[in-house]
Amino acid sequence: MIEFYCIDEYVKKSIEKLFSDEQCCGNNQDILLDENKSFVVLYKILYNDEEYKDDEDVEDNGGNKFRIFISSIHLLNIVSMSQHIHVDATYQVIWQGFPVLVIGTTDLNKAFHPFGLAICSNEKKTKYFEFIFKSVQIGMQKINKALLQPTALILDAVDSIKNDFKNVFNDSYNQIMYWAHMKRKVENCIRQQKNQTILDFLNYFDSEWLKSNNGWYEGLQLYAPSTNNALEATNKTIKDDGIFRERHVLSRFLTISSNIINNWSIEQDLSLVNARIFATGSTISLEL
């Protein structure tokens, strides 16, 4: 269980500063025109004696709890071109142990394009994945674009992600997971339960991999990848280039995350040289 650390006034002011920058866009033409500028789309801070009105399962172990989603106008514009979502949490980034949640999509060249990132006090029990999904929708409303209507979710068979996704996107969708995860789980089941009968194994496989998690086979959805490799590579880039494999305190990482969002956004800017273009068609050549 992750311990909760106090959110000091400096952290609180840093969050509110990023949020207020976005709020004053209507009065500040420079911010409005800079689509690469990072801003806090949505945040919540819960102090010791407060309760979230929209959460029934917040941990009752004391301490401050928080949720922050940071993005840019340019990154949110990518949502309009998205049909499927990648989302995952990465650790060993913030000194206090808080997870960083990254959400985005992949194009037809399987290149990852992030929507933004969230920093939360814990990824478990408190609907933080639901928070990041709702934040994307709120961001789309703020830039006056159509809401995201995904047809697939690519994940690592984490129940908290699946449940939170259903709470936000009620439409039917394909749940895609990497088949290697299924293979490892099945192999572990065989090793740990050596005395099980064939019927026991078939019942386990039917319940777990044909009913509960049935999106592990290749070709489940056209143009959607079957792995989270592109997102995991982005998480590695955050650790290698964003923080240089050092853990930072929360207040420092807020500044770093703002720079990360800004860099991601600039990479996608088509007006710049060597921009990462969102591929809407495969560039694989069939020529010999």
Image (tube, rainbow, N blue to C red):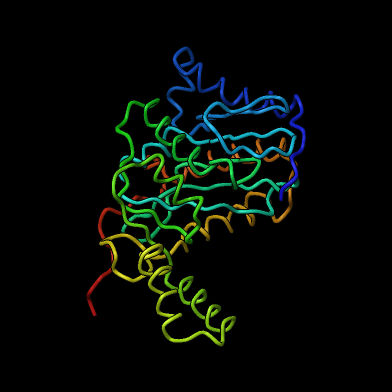
Q: Is residue 20 left or right of residue 245?
A: left
State the residue in front, 277 or 192. 192
Q: Residue at x 52, y 60 (%)?
A: 233
- Decide if residue 118 is on the left or right side of residue 107: right
Which residue: 48% across, 61% down?
A: 156
Seen in the picture, residue 265 relative to 217 is either above or below; the reply is above
120 and 59: which one is in front?
59
Q: Position of residue 276 (x, y in %)?
A: 40, 50
Residue 256 against residue 175 in the figure, above or below: above
Whether 244 is drawn above or below 41: the answer is below
Q: Position of residue 199 (x, y in %)?
A: 41, 83
Is 153 above or below relative to 62? below
- Where residue 128 appears, as percent x and y from the top left, is 55, 41
Q: Residue at x 59, y 81 (%)?
A: 192
Q: Give the mark count.
A: 0
Give the residue furthest to the top.
Answer: 27
Picture quadrant of residue 5: top right
Residue 168, quarter of the rendered image = top left
Q: Position of residue 212 (x, y in %)?
A: 40, 62
Quarter occupied by the C terminus: bottom left
In the figure, is residue 125 to the left or right of 143?
Answer: right
Query: What residue is at 74 percent from the left and 40 percent from the top?
Result: 4
Of 138 and 165, which appears nearest the observer? 165
